[in-house]
């Protein structure tokens, strides 16, 4: 076997998952190959990626860490020679080094510690550098498995579960900061996230020219492709303008209308849950009472992964996933229109009376006729 540069990939959480393990592994392999364009070979507890662009592993959920590694034969002399030649260019200017051997193949001729000593001694003999196992300037990792892998830097992966192992959800996406982050967190739990967006335009085709499509493309880096359901909200707007006594209830009514429409779409398409970007107490419409008024009217679970996040944490995450800059771009969102003094404690009887006077059920039926879906 020739020396060969490959990418060694370790997955974390997956190995815990008992009988689902092979399903998860296969999804992860598919996702890695799709993102990088390379070829993955599975070995016990690790994958090896050849060719393709390993840079893109930073978008793949389910990976605990990865490293550019030199693959060599399982033979002590070969390993020592390969380490010495690999560190030739790395060791100058370093004051210390450490060798860390991991032996997955228990039949290998020497123990981890013996091999660490052999490699360590040959490095210090040749380069006169001292050993420091706690805080070395240069770490040399050697992993003995099906073959032997030698590497120097580990890159942390995104962790989480591979896209597609947990099923499809439908995320209510606004032009704001929170809902893209909530969607990202559901992707991280292995969901394929589809989107539904309510907008102020009379025609769905206007959305193609807005930042919303950029938000979706940015998030697609993590899941490849998706669907977005576009919903004009003018029917609701007209009905709410006509309704008397609506003062302060616009937002709760709008949100109930949105989740009901979304629930219908989800059921028609086999999506198993809705997702929103609510964070408890962040704004008046997100008090515990108001959230209850929204979650209790539909049969599907509503996941709100940001419920316990504070705004700064959400912003930091939005910056990490590159949606922040898009989210703060100017956009005519529905909620900026329904700006009122929202009630923090909703009265169920009043809400239901208002919905009856607006004939909300038939509004929902008419709204469903106006929806179009785009594959992105
Ligand atoms: P965001 O930053 O996600 O807009 P927010 O803090 O502005 O959240 P709200 O406006 O109360 O909060 O919206 C709460 C949630 O309702 C949003 O996170 C999103 O999931 C959903 N939502 C709001 N507006 C829309 C919309 N126009 N289309 C689809 N979903 C929406
Ligand atoms: Mg908003």
Image (spheres, rainbow, N blue to C red):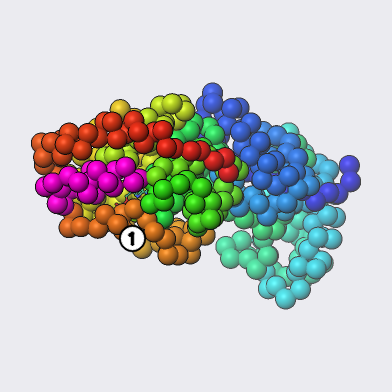
Residue 359 falls in image quadrant: top left
Name the residue located 41 percent from the left edge and 48 percent from the top edge.
202
At label 1, counting other C-alpha atoms closer than 10 Å, the crowd grade (few under 14, some 14-19, many 20 or more) is some
Placement of the N terminus among the 4 image quadrants: top right
Furthest toward the right, the residue is 2
Q: Magenta stretch: residue 67 in it?
A: no
The image quarter containing residue 19 is top right
The quadrant of the picture showing ligand 2 is bottom left
Viewer-closest of 200 and 176:
200
Q: Is residue 239 magenta?
A: yes
Q: Position of residue 351 (x, y in %)?
A: 15, 39
- Above-or-below relation of 36 to 17: below
The residue labelled by disc 1 is 311
Relative to the observer, which residue lies in front, 347 or 93? 347
In the orientation shown, which residue stands out farthest toward the top? Answer: 19
Q: In this view, does 167 lie to the left or right of 35?
A: left
* Residue 7 drawn above or below residue 39: below
Q: Where is residue 305 in the image (x, y as percent from the top left)?
A: 37, 45
In the rendered image, is residue 157 in sight? no
**Is disc 1's CB within 8 Å of ligand 1?**
no
Q: Nearer the viewer, residue 326 or 157?
A: 326
Please say if 39 is above or below 336. Answer: above
Q: How many marks?
A: 1
Q: Identify the residue shown where x is 74% and y is 36%.
A: 41
Q: In this view, does 127 lie to the left or right of 285?
A: right
Is residue 264 visible in the rendered image? The answer is yes
The answer to whether 45 is drawn above or below residue 280 in the figure is above
Q: What stretch is highlighted in magenta?
A: 233-254
Question: Magenta stretch: dominant SS?
Answer: helix
Identify the residue shown where x is 22% and y is 49%. Answer: 241
Left or right of 284, for residue 122:
right
């Amino acid at each position: 076997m020739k020396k060969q540069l490959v990418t060694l990939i370790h997955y974390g959480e997956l190995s815990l998952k008992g009988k689902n393990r092979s399903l998860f592994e296969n999804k992860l392999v598919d996702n890695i190959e799709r993102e990088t364009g390379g070829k993955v070979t599975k070995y016990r507890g690790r994958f090896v990626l050849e060719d393709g662009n390993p840079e893109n592993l930073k978008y793949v959920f389910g990976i605990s860490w990865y490293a550019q590694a030199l693959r060599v034969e399982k033979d002590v002399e070969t390993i020592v020679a390969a380490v010495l030649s690999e560190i030739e260019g790395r060791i100058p200017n370093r004051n210390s080094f450490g060798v860390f051997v991991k032996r997955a193949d228990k039949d290998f001729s020497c123990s981890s510690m013996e091999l660490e000593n052999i490699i360590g001694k040959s490095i210090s003999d040749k380069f006169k550098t001292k050993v420091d196992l706690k805080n070395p300037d240069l770490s040399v990792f050697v992993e003995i498995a099906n073959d032997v892998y030698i590497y120097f830097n580990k890159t942390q992966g995104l962790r989480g579960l591979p896209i597609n192992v947990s099923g499809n959800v439908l995320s209510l996406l606004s032009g704001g900061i929170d809902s893209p982050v909530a969607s990202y967190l559901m992707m991280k739990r292995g969901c394929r996230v589809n989107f539904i967006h309510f907008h102020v335009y009379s025609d769905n085709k206007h959305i193609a020219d807005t930042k919303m499509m950029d938000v979706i493309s940015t998030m697609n880096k993590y899941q490849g492709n998706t669907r977005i359901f576009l919903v004009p909200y003018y029917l609701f707007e007209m009905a709410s303008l006509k309704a008397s006594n609506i003062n302060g209830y616009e937002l709760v009514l709008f949100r109930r209308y949105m989740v009901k429409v979304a629930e219908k779409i989800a059921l028609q398409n086999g999506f198993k849950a809705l997702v929103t970007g609510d964070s408890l107490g962040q704004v008046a419409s997100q008090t515990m009472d108001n959230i209850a008024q929204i979650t209790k009217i539909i049969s599907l679970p509503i996941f709100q992964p940001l419920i316990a996040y504070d705004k700064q944490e959400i912003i930091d995450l939005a910056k990490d996933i590159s949606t922040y800059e898009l989210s703060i771009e100017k956009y005519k969102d529905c909620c900026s229109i329904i700006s009122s003094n929202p009630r923090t404690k909703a009265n169920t009887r009043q809400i239901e009376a208002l919905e009856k006077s607006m004939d909300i059920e038939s509004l929902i039926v008419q709204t469903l006729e106006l929806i179009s879906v785009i594959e992105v």
